[in-house]
Amino acid sequence: MLRENLNSIHPLDFGNLTFGHSGIVFVAKALCLSSRYLSTVDCIGHDIVQDTERLAHYLMNEPRLYLFGGFVKHLLAPRVHPEFSDIDLISLTTDTMRILEDQFAYTFKDVSPSATSYPRYYLGKSTLAGKVIQFILMRSAADAMKFIASAQYDADRVGYSAGRFEFNETVGEQAIRNAISTKQVNLVSGTRDLSLFSINRPLVEQRHKLKLLRKGFTINA
């Protein structure tokens, strides 16, 4: 697998990073086929996938989008979280979905629990960008921040929109930054507003817990 920048938007010191994948070879960006990298796909062969930098630039500067999850952890602590598996985002309009379709070759599938449920959930896959997008459609910025602020763990209570981080005031910026940079995650006590979550939220949160543990997080109840 040829990789120039691990899909990071930050410059990284490769000497300080370690990898479990013995097949990764770092090369100059000029050899990555104009911001594309060559990915080895099991049982298929090789596939050329577009670098995430241009996509990240759009998502980070679009005021109608709110990023959260692993992408935001990468923004806050790139040396601790040099990679992210997929992109979690909340959009206030379907216009952003059209832009992702037209400019980044995404196709979106409605995966909402029911035909009338709110918010609406979509799964986006691209033939170019290489990252799956978990797309949530909401009506207002207030709903977007309420959704993020109701996460079970302190490390997940931060969003990013139009060039700035939005930290949950209940937990506090310092505590959230510390949880992300140390991988010491705390279960937030007290009552949570679950009104914007789907009925499958308990299962979603259980899967999320397992993902955190696999990534080396310590979870403090």
Image (cartoon, grey):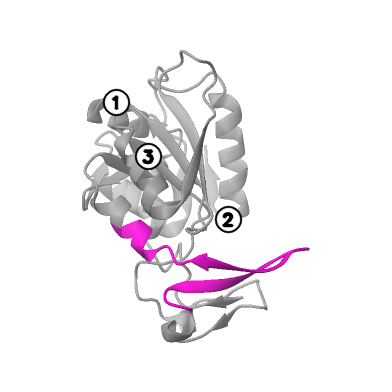
Of residues 50 and 120, the one drawn nearer to the viewer in this rendering:
50
Q: CA distance from mark 2 to mark 1?
A: 29 Å
Identified at 50% across, 76% down, the residue is 17
- Residue at image point 24% right, 43% down: 166
Q: Which residue is mark 2?
A: 215
Q: Quadrant of residue 111?
A: top right
Which of the marked residues, 3 or 1, is nearer the chain's N terminus? 3
In the foreground, 113 or 30: 30
Over which residues does the magenta segment extend? 33-57
> Which residue, given by chain and number where applicable, does mark 3 sit on?
97
Q: Mark 2: which amino acid?
A: Lys
| Residue type (three-letter) at the residue carrying disc 1 | Asp
Evaluate if marks 3 and 1 touch, with contact meaning CB atoms under 8 Å apart. Answer: no
User: Residue 72, position in %: x, y?
Assistant: 37, 52
> Disc number at residue 143?
1
**Residue 103, placed above or below residue 3:** above
Give me the C-alpha separation between circle 3 and circle 1.
18 Å
Secondary structure found at label 1: helix
The mark lying in front, picked from 2 and 3, is 3
Q: Is residue 209 above or below residue 114?
A: below
- Report x, y in % for residue 103: 37, 53
Residue 8 percent location from the top left of the image: 41, 67
Quadrant housing the N terminus: bottom right
In front: label 3 or label 1: 3
Q: Does residue 191 belong to the magenta stretch?
A: no
Above or below residue 93? Residue 165 is: below
Q: Nearer the viewer, residue 160 or 29?
A: 29
Query: Quick one: SS at disc 3?
Result: helix
Numbered circle sitting on residue 78:
none
Disc 3 residue type? Met
Q: Residue at x 24, y 31 (%)?
A: 141
